[in-house]
Amino acid sequence: MSTPALITAAVLFLIVFGTACYAIFYLKSTPVRIAAVLLAMGSLVAAMAPVIRILAEPVPAPIAARTLTTAVTALPLDGRPGKGK
């Protein structure tokens, strides 16, 4: 896993767990709400697994573009065939 991918994953996890701590701190008086927050955070972490997997994949090298061009002779505007070169 490359360094930017590790930083991104770490920031995502910090945001998720920071949000969980914040919610639990302000909902500590109602256990049912805390359970709902924990369930929601668990779902969020499970949904983040594919994102981390995508970030961990190596980036393929770019493919050089190849173009083939063909010379086209333009006809004069009056409709007569042009002179060959």
Image: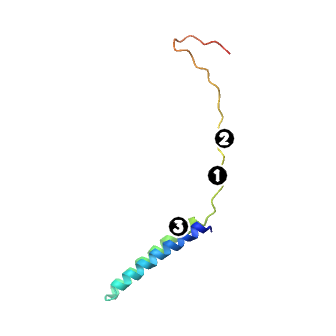
Q: Residue at the spot x=31%, y=89% of the render?
A: 29
Task: Give the class, few, some or many, for how many residues have Cα within 10 Å of label 3's Cα (few <14, many ≥20).
Answer: few
Q: Residue at the spot x=53%, y=69% of the render?
A: 8
Against 83, residue 17 (above or below) is below
Could you tell me residue 28's position as x and y percent?
Answer: 34, 88
Label of residue 66 in the image: 2
Q: Amino acid at mark 2?
A: Arg
Against 13, residue 69 (above or below) is above
Q: Amino acid at mark 3?
A: Val
Tell whether 25 sits left or right of 52: left
Q: Residue at the spot x=41%, y=82% of the render?
A: 21
Helix, strand or loop at mark 3 = helix
Could you tell me residue 13's position as x and y percent?
Answer: 49, 75
Helix, strand or loop at mark 1 = loop
Work out whether mark 2 precedes mark 3 in sequence or the reverse, and give the earlier one: 3
Q: Most extreme residue toward the right, as rendered?
A: 85
Helix, strand or loop at mark 2 = loop
Label of residue 62 in the image: 1
Q: CA distance from mark 2 to mark 3?
A: 33 Å
Q: Nearer the viewer, residue 17 or 39?
A: 17
Q: Amino acid at mark 1?
A: Pro
Q: Quadrant of residue 73?
A: top right
User: What residue would you read off at disc 3?
Assistant: 51
Against 21, residue 54 (above or below) is above
Q: CA distance from mark 1 to mark 3?
A: 22 Å
Task: Give the class, few, some or many, for how many residues have Cα within 10 Å of label 1's Cα (few <14, many ≥20).
Answer: few
Label of residue 6 in the image: none
